[in-house]
Image (cartoon, helix red, strand yellow):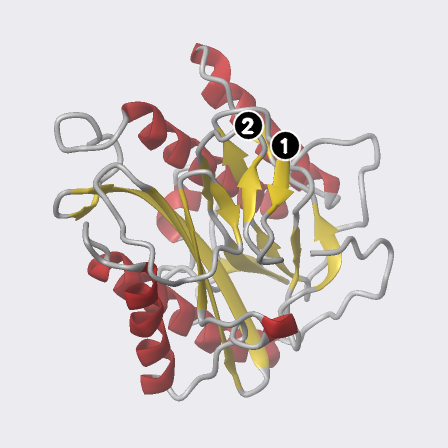
């Protein structure tokens, strides 16, 4: 996705955020259904069909299908694929690192979220279960570190003052996860973004610290926080299909994302069933519950 620079930000009313929450809950259902369907022997096209059915049953529409020509309902990125993997005939196997990015539109308002997991013999492994249950513990650590970095970035929306505080929080969390000696790289070519009446809006949300503190965080902003972390350098390249982004060094990657609203009374994670209450509560952040 392109860098938006200092373009105008779309600020939302509480009523508009509530519609976005409806879209976010559809996305949450999509990702839950895809995780439940993921098994060794399943194809990524099978997962795409599951996602399409959930969106249709909810009376929503896909914001991925047809976006700049993208041919599927979700992105499925496996192992060294970072983002934008196109679902197809690829068969999933035990030990695969699978990242799924999904979105939906309700009444013209968008939701966007992503999850990653290590696949075991019976489906996605619970955090910390890799090893005897299948999968590489280092891949499990990668998935958990990426998720933790996302939640750290989301928490910074509540505790910080400037957009750059998000990137600082994400990078700090990655550094903490790598303190034990694991090599973790932050993908810098692709970033988080604003969301609302379009899936991708200003401002860019970086996943790393810079000297630029960025714009002031204000109520009405809706932002996607989405770190992409690798077990290598963080450098990437795009495949000939024009979509799939892979790590340049062949290392495995993980991707987590939530859509978040900044409100007068705090923040709300629009694509989390509990609004982010459990994970943010552990970080000392209260959330605004919209339902």
Is residue 264 shown left or right of residue 32?
right
Residue at 66% across, 46% down: 190
Q: In the rendered image, is residue 202 in sight? A: yes
Residue at 59% across, 25% down: 233
Position above or below: 77 against 168: below
Position above or below: 105 against 116: below
Per the image, the residue denoted by label 1 is 235
Secondary structure category for the residue under label 1: loop
The label number, if any, that marks residue 249 in the structure image: 2
Earlier residue among tags 1 and 2? 1
Judging depth in this view, the residue of 35 and 82 nearest the camera is 82
Judging depth in this view, the residue of 275 and 5 nearest the camera is 5
Mark in the foreground, 1 or 2: 2
| Residues at marks 1 and 2 touching, judged by CB atoms closer than 8 Å | yes
Q: Callout 2: few (<14), some (14-19), or many (20+) C-alpha neighbours within 10 Å?
A: some
Is residue 72 shown left or right of residue 4?
left
Residue at 84% across, 66% down: 8
Residue 272 picture quarter = bottom left
Judging depth in this view, the residue of 152 and 123 nearest the camera is 123
Residue 162 picture quarter = top right
Viewport quadrant of the C terminus:
bottom left
Q: In the rendered image, is residue 227 in sight? A: no
Residue 203 picture quarter = bottom right
């Amino acid at each position: 996705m392109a860098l938006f620079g200092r373009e105008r930000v779309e600020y939302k009313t509480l009523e508009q955020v509530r519609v976005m929450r409806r879209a976010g809950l559809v996305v949450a259902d999509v990702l839950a259904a895809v995780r439940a369907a993921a098994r060794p022997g399943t194809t990524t096209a099978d997962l795409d069909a599951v996602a399409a059915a959930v969106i249709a049953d909810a009376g929503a529409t896909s914001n991925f299908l047809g976006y700049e020509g993208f041919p599927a309902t979700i992105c499925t990125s496996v192992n060294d694929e970072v983002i934008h993997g196109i679902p197809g005939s690829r068969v999933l196997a035990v030990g695969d690192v699978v990242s799924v990015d999904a979105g939906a539109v309700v009444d013209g308002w968008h939701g966007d979220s992503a999850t990653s997991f290590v696949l075991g013999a019976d489906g996605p492994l619970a955090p910390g279960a890799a090893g005897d249950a299948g999968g590489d513990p280092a891949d499990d650590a990668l998935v958990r570190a990426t998720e933790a970095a996302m939640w750290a970035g989301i928490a910074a929306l509540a505790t910080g003052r400037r957009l750059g505080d998000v990137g600082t929080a994400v990078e700090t969390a990655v550094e903490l996860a790598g303190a034990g000696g694991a090599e973790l790289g932050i993908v810098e070519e692709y970033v988080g973004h604003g969301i609302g009446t379009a899936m991708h809006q200003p401002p860019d949300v970086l996943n790393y610290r810079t000297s630029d503190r960025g714009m002031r965080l204000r109520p009405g902003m809706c932002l996607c926080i989405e770190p992409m972390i690798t077990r290598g350098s963080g450098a990437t390249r795009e495949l000939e299909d024009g979509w799939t982004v892979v790590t340049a060094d062949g290392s495995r990657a993980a991707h987590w994302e939530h859509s978040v609203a900044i409100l007068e009374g705090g923040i709300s994670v629009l694509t989390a069933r509990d609004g982010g209450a459990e994970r943010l509560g552990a970080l000392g952040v209260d959330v605004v519950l919209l339902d």
